[in-house]
Amino acid sequence: MRNPKNSWDKSDSFFGVVNLDYVSEDMEIADEWVKTFHPDLNWPEEFTDEGCNLAEEYADKLIKNGVLRLNDNDDVADLAFIGPQDMKLAQTLIKAGPEHRKFLRQIFVSVDITAPLYWWKEMDTYKVATVANSTSTMHKLTSKPITLESFEVDDFNPEIVYYEIPGAQNDIGMFADFMIEQLEFLRQKYLETKDKRYWKELVRWLPNGWLQTRTWTANYETIRAICSPGQRRFHKLNEWGGYDDPSKNNFIKWARELPYAQYLIFDDENIPFQIEK
């Protein structure tokens, strides 16, 4: 980010490891970071009550945004502390447009996403600067029993399926139960006979609600575009932005948990980056 103007000496960010227990002896890194880059805050030489409170305030702000990786006990973290001056430059470049915020394209993200096929069809719209490596329907579709849990059912409403469609009251098996039963039948017949015709029919009639896991790789610039108000932030499909039920897992909710997402991805919501004195 500072390469174009050779301004690396102005960087006030810090990268290191810190213990997340909020006691004075564990705040050394946050302590030194503030002392070095913000001497105007008159940081106490000794850990008075005031000093401990300030240390905790800084630690809360920095650790909340900058945790990159936790150890197995969730008490030690690798951190990237982005300083106020670096963040000011970052947000200036972001507002200047895509050609100036190239650094966002170099912040890489990889994540395992399990989602229904109908969601993946929409995600496949985003092919620039993304890679997706999926579990194989071709090779692994028949490897485990097909049950209701094989499909996206977070907001499944059986009353609509079974009772509001004419004739469904008399034969609810026409819908979800019957579909799953027939798919499982085809799966078992294929395993018994190894006849590819059963496998082909299984693939042919696999519904859009089928869950598939993909390891998805992108960068902050692409995620920023996906999460923009004109793209998926307010999409009516709950899996994107929690339109109907924000408590359910959705892409926007996950993106908001990325490091510094509120300043680099959702900066249009005007959340200032500052630490009060």
Image (tube, grey):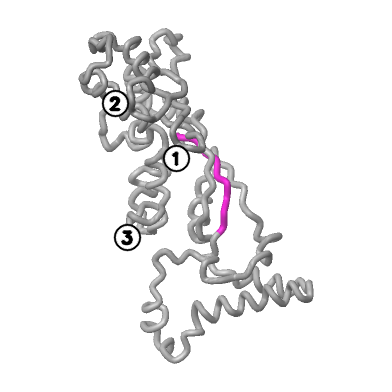
Q: Which mark is residue 56?
A: 2
Q: CA distance from mark 3 to mark 1?
A: 22 Å
Chain part drawn in magenta: 212-220
Closer to us: 77 or 210? 77
Q: Earlier in the sequence, mark 1 or mark 2?
A: 2
Are the residues flagged by discs 3 and 2 in contact, CB closer than 8 Å?
no
Q: Secondary structure at mark 3?
A: loop
**Amino acid type at image mark 1:** Ile
Q: Residues within 10 Å of mark 3 (few under 14, many from 20)?
A: few
Q: Position of residue 207 (x, y in %)?
A: 55, 69
10 Å crowding of disc 1: few (<14), some (14-19), many (20+): many
Disc 1 vs disc 2: which is toward the camera?
Answer: 2
Instruction: Determine which quarter of the picture holds residue 33.
Output: top left
Q: Is residue 58 left or right of residue 179?
A: left
Can residue 199 be seen here? The reply is yes
Specify the principal SS of the magenta part: strand
Q: Secondary structure at mark 2?
A: helix
**Mark 3 or mark 1, which has the lower sequence index?**
1
Q: Closest to the observer: 18 or 249? A: 18
Q: Is 188 rendered above or below residue 136?
A: below
Q: Position of residue 249 (x, y in %)?
A: 41, 54
Which residue does the image show at 46% across and 21% down from the upper left?
Answer: 16
> Where's the N terminus, which quadrant?
top left
Question: What numbered label is drawn on residue 223?
Answer: 1
Real-space Cα distance between discs 1 and 2? 31 Å
